[in-house]
Amino acid sequence: MKIFAALFIGLVAADVSGTWTLHYDQDFSGHPATYQCTLRQQGQKLTATCDNGGVTLTGQVEDRKVTFEHTTGKNNDIVVRYTGMLNQEGSFMKGAWQYVDPRDKKEKTGRFAFEKQ
């Protein structure tokens, strides 16, 4: 019975709602950047609103896997996708972002990390 309870607790995702700092290893222009974000979790659904021009990321958390996306570009025609993993404590996540540049049709990638405040 104790093993079952431990497995169940391990499968329940931590609530990641709160204030987080977003660190880009390189942002979309190729530079490091840091932003403050507010994450809200409702079940598996996630929303992150960041102080970099009011960008809102939408996504989900399942177990410890986190995915987000948002649109950007002149006509909001670029979809940036983030995929990462949440640590066991629910206080840090890291992963990669990617999008396809509409000008040259090449994939652009970088690394990100969120740290809970």
Image (tube, helix red, strand yellow):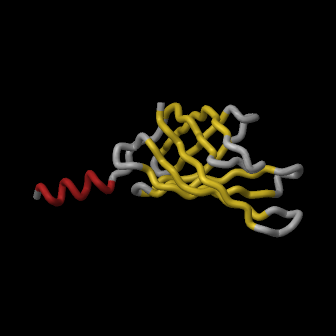
Q: Extreme left residue here?
A: 1
| Residue furthest bottom as drawn | 105
Where is residue 76? Give x, y as percent.
Answer: 82, 52
Instruction: Relative to 50, say whether 44 is above or below.
Output: below
* Point 53% across, 38% down: residue: 40
4 or 84: which is nearer to us? 84
Quarter occupied by the N terminus:
bottom left
Q: Residue at x 25, y 56 (%)?
A: 8
On the rendered structure, is 71 left or right of 12? right
Image position of 68 with respect to 92: above or below: below
Q: Looking at the image, how many numbered discs can be counted on the residues?
A: 0
- What residue lies at 45% left-to-right and 41% top-to-bottom? 16
Q: Position of residue 94 (x, y in %)?
A: 51, 50
Location of residue 52 (image quadrant): top right
Q: Residue at x 15, y 59 (%)?
A: 3
Q: Is residue 105 left or right of residue 64?
A: right
What x and y, as percent, mark residue 36?
A: 61, 32
